[in-house]
Amino acid sequence: MSKDKSNRDILVTNALPYANGPLHLGHILEHIQSDIWVRYQKLIGNYCTYICGEDAHGTSIMLKAEELDISPEELIDRVKKSHLEDLEAFDIDYDNFYTTHSEENKFYSELIFKRLKEQNLVEEKEIEQLYDTEKKLFLSDRYIKGQCPKCGAKDQYGDNCEACSTTYSATELLNPISVITNSQPELKKSTHLFFKLSNLKKEIKEWLDNAKISKQARNKLLEWVDGEIKDWDISRDKPYFGFKIPGYTDQYFYVWLDAPIGYLASHKNYLDKKNQSETFEDFWNSDSVKELYHFIGKDIMYFHALFFPVMLLKANFRQPNGVFIHGFLTVDSEKMSKSRGTFILAKTFHKNLDPEYLRYYFAAKLSSGVEDIDLNLNDFCQRVNSDLIGKFVNIGSRTAKFINDNFHNKLSLNPHNEELINEFINRSPVVHQAYEQREYSKAIREIMRLADKANQYIDKMQPWVLIKDKDNNELVQSVCTTSLNLFRLLAIMLIPVLPKLTTRVFEFLSIKTPVWEEIDILLLDHKISKYKPLLTRIDEANIEKIRKQTKES
């Protein structure tokens, strides 16, 4: 797409999946949410770049590679390939999918660290860490489990609580256990580097006052800011897989320092590969007026909405315009669990069912809030069959055959009910605004309400009865022309959610994929193609197959 100076220039990022295992549907939820918003922005004519990549550093990568007897780099490449296969299956269309283990990320991590240090925002402190005496390894947060020091929830990792979202030091966990050896770790002293976050409450609040963040998330973030903001530990001891900190012996950048900087690195890599006229500085300089938004889960909002924005500010880079935060995914009202058959891998799903079914179902449930979203597999089956087959696709399948069989595939010059067509066009701003505000469920409700009206119109006109009398031929052609124009309008509204299905709709209508501003153009005196089934119903057997394979995996 060429840039139009009157249109917005937006960069969208998705949380980086960790490069030590396969994607599950909880990951896919977020990628679908961000992909829909990007597709919508492109549909309405904005210039929108969409980037992501592998989160490739940390103890977990090192240990997983060791377990597989391969190098960390080989592990990252393997997992990246697997992740891309899954993302492509779900029609996640990144402009660039990179990795934090890159020269670009090393450069910007060192540059940001240097700038923070020059402002006396980095301090050395002697700390006590949990140390696995059997493995002879300082334990990273994800390799320690215990009870949350605030709410008492059991089985929580050593950095933040999934139950109450509190962040804490691993040493604050109650009854800590090493996940690696299942032994009780001991405290051991080490010198670490800290980013002086506690000095920057004012700057954090100023950013929160101006950023686009949901009210629920903002309230939680302000609760943290109004409490005790602790300095941020940004280094780790060897052995560790990551970037060594310049000027320090055996100290590495903590993964949560270089992971979000990976957004800068991925964007730089994209611009360099594409030889874009826009420079990295155009976008990332502190005075940039272009837009930057992060899509993340609520478990990592502390890092993205407190730590990262103020780090960028103090390193003289631009800050995000907003952070869009979603809740967790449950399956059949349960936390994702292998034993219950609810820990569904992305591959398990897309090998058994069309991924667009899930894109639709998630869109029908997603809002701009941070509430958890439940994938109820029975409801999923019923809703997809009812909405996509029974309502949307039904409009085309019920009327196309009359145009194909009786009018040489040609639509009439005049629609029978232009008033109804105009009603659909006049309601399109409701869908437009809902997409912009990430209220996808509202957009889907409006689209399906209109689909109901289209089907009611067909029921009322009964072209299958009218066609029995040759005197009604002109009326039947006009009624079906009206119906197929309504079908086209709904398909345009569904492009961000169902890119492949809507492409098939436009191929049947013998038109190029429209842009949003073409929504009021009617197909009149126009030849369409022979109708072929666009979508098949979900069979309950497919759902049971997914459940069975999930339990066995």
Image (cartoon, rainbow, N blue to C red):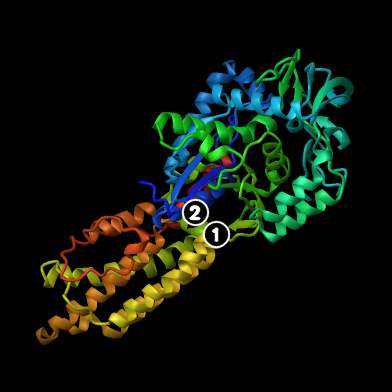
Q: Is residue 52 visible?
A: no
Task: Identify the image quadrant of residue 400.
Answer: bottom left
C-beta proximity under 8 Å, tags 1 and 2:
yes
Q: Which mark is residue 438?
A: 1
Q: Which mark is residue 110?
A: none
Foreground pick, 325 / 359: 325
Q: Position of residue 294 (x, y in %)?
A: 59, 46
Position of 349 with respect to 164 (left or right) is left
Which residue is tagged 2?
37
Q: Secondary structure at mark 1?
A: loop
**Residue at x 72% of width, y 41% of height:** 310
- Mark 2: amino acid: Trp
Q: Residues within 10 Å of mark 1 (few under 14, many from 20)?
A: many
Foreground pick, 337 / 396: 396
**Residue at x 23% of width, y 68% of height:** 523
Foreground pick, 453 / 308: 308
